[in-house]
Every structure is written in C-alpha cells, then in structure tokens.
C-alpha cells in the first residue's frame, strides 16, 4: 500500500507536515526537483495506469517520472495524506489557440487554504511552487508567470519565458474524471499525439532545467539554451541515469523511432537542431 513516508523519502523532504502554506510550497518544490516529467511509456506503446497504487509503484518505488496524470495524481494524493484540501481540475494546454478540444489534455490541482493555490507538476518546465489564484504576474526566482481570468470563467496560466508549453486554461470546479480518462486514452493512442511521437524527459531547478527531447540533450537557463546531440541508445541510457535517475528503460527498442522522428523534424538523423 502507498505510504506517505516513502513518498517523502523519494522527494527528499524532511520538513513538517502541517497543512499550511509553508508545507505546501516545500513539498511542491521538493517533488519538482526530484521527479522528472516524462511520458516514455506512451512512446513505448504501453498503457500507463493512473491509479494511485500504480503511480506510486512507478514513481516512488521504481524512481521513474510521469506525465501530468501521474505526477499531479501523486502530488494530490500526498497533499491529501498530509491534511490538505485538494481539488483536481480539468485543464487544456493551448486552449488559447486550439479551443475546447484541448480540455482534458492536462490536469491540475487547486489547494484550498486561506486562498486557493494552483499546484502543477505535470507541464514539464513550469511551476516550481504553487501560485495563489490571483490575476497578475507571479515571480519565482527570476522566472515570471502570469494568471488571467477570462470572460468565460476560465483562468489562463502563462508559463515563464523559457518554459514550454506556453499556456493552459482551467476552471476552479471539480474535475470531470471521465473526460480526463478519455483524453488520456486519446493522447496515448492517437498516432498524431505528441506523446506517441516524441521522447521527452524534463527535470527542473530554480532558474533552469535539463531535458532530453528526442535525441537532443538540452540545458535551459537564464544564460540561454545549450544543446547536445545524443550519440547512441547506450549514451541515452547513461544520460537518463545521470540527469533524471531513470533506470530500466530499453532505449535500444525505442532508438529507431527516436531517429525517425529526429529526421522528420530536422532533415537527417544526425542533423544538429537549431
């Protein structure tokens, strides 16, 4: 059975567990810097189980990462175990550009204290700490985020200038879990899904991040973006351990798909991306 202490050990959290703003921020940041965002299982053609026991086994016991349904599912469970009032909410990444068809491609958490706070560790390179649900700019170190209340009742989150994706919309209402399940199933089955086509793993730091996108190792910081072409599946496996703590992924099986996608995007399997 999932145990909160195992989760706290996984994210190296040693603080108090009182349901207050200090604990909320500290747990959120500890998971942000310990658990990578990744959807490797989807690329591999597997079917992720979003139930808490399966997510706990994957992220806590096997020390993997996950996509939003897993990372935010785990965070929400842990916060509830620590005594927080947590509400899951449906979100739509790029709803600003693509409309309501995006709803359900992301799930976020709203934590109720004296004010409501947006908690989200399922976007990749985005929030390090929660945001109070208030319009305007919000600084986290040198990174600036923004929240806007839209006329249709949705909130729009704008990511920091170096982060991607750039925005998502959500409402402060309980999640439609059937919609989330259906959209998750679509994203892991649709041949045109970003997750079906692309290898991605991202881990954040205060003002920077490290990522593997396809066969490219990318370091993003305030100084700019540094990119390195990954030479082989063996090299990829080494980098997954070194930067993300991820072990046990058979990169030899995924490598042909990664090369094919790289060639489709950049014109040749060995092309250095711009």
Image: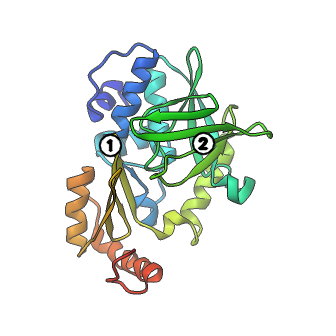
Q: Position of residue 176 (x, y in %)?
A: 69, 40
Instruction: Say which quarter of the image contains residue 56.
Output: top left
Q: Foreground: 120 or 196? A: 120
Q: Position of residue 216 (x, y in %)?
A: 33, 68
Answer few, some or many: residues within 10 Å of disc 2's Cα (few below 14, many 20 plus, some between 14 and 19): many
Secondary structure under the numbered disc 1 in the rendered image: loop
Q: Foreground: 200 or 252? A: 200
Pick whichever of labels 2 and 1 is earlier in the sequence.
2
Above or below, 241 against 132 in this view is below
Q: Foreground: 130 or 122? A: 130
Q: Which residue is mark 1?
A: 205
Q: Residue furthest front?
A: 223
Q: How many marks?
A: 2
Q: Residue at x 23, y 75 (%)?
A: 231
Quarter of the image with the N terminus is top left
The answer to whether residue 28 is left or right of residue 92 is left
Q: Residue at x 36, y 46 (%)?
A: 58
Answer few, some or many: residues within 10 Å of disc 1's Cα (few below 14, many 20 plus, some between 14 and 19): some
Above or below, 101 against 24 in this view is below
Q: Which residue is mark 2?
A: 157
Q: Residue at x 20, y 69 (%)?
A: 235
Q: Residue furthest right?
A: 152
Q: How is the image coloured?
A: rainbow
Secondary structure under the numbered disc 2 in the rendered image: strand
Give the CA distance from mark 2 to mark 1.
Answer: 20 Å
Q: Position of residue 202 (x, y in %)?
A: 37, 53
Q: Foreground: 211 or 254? A: 211
Q: Position of residue 203 (x, y in %)?
A: 34, 49
């Amino acid at each position: 059975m999932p145990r909160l202490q195992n989760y706290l050990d996984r994210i190296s959290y040693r603080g108090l567990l009182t349901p207050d703003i200090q604990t909320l921020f500290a747990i959120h940041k500890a998971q942000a810097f310990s658990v990578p965002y990744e959807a490797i299982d989807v690329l591999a053609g597997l079917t992720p189980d979003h139930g808490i026991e399966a997510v706990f086994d994957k992220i806590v016991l096997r020390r993997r990462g996950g996509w939003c349904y897993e990372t935010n599912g785990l965070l929400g469970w842990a916060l509830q175990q620590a005594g927080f009032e947590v509400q899951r909410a449906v979100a739509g990444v790029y709803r600003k550009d693509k409309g309501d068809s995006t709803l359900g491609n992301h799930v976020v958490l709203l934590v109720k204290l004296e004010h409501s706070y947006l908690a989200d560790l399922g976007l990749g390179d985005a929030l390090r700490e929660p945001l109070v649900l208030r319009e305007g700019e919000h600084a986290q170190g040198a990174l600036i985020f923004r929240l806007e209340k839209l006329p249709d009742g949705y909130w729009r989150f704008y990511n920091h200038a170096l982060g991607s994706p750039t925005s998502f919309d959500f409402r402060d209402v309980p999640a439609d879990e059937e919609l989330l399940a259906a959209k998750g199933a679509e994203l892991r089955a649709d041949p045109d899904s970003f997750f079906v086509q692309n290898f991605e793993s991202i881990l954040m730091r205060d003002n920077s991040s490290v990522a593997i996108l396809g066969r490219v190792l990318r370091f993003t910081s305030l100084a700019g973006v540094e990119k390195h072409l990954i030479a082989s599946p063996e090299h990829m496996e080494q980098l997954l351990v070194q930067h993300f703590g991820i072990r046990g992924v058979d990169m030899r099986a995924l490598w042909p798909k990664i090369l094919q996608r790289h060639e489709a995007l950049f014109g040749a399997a060995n092309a250095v991306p711009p």
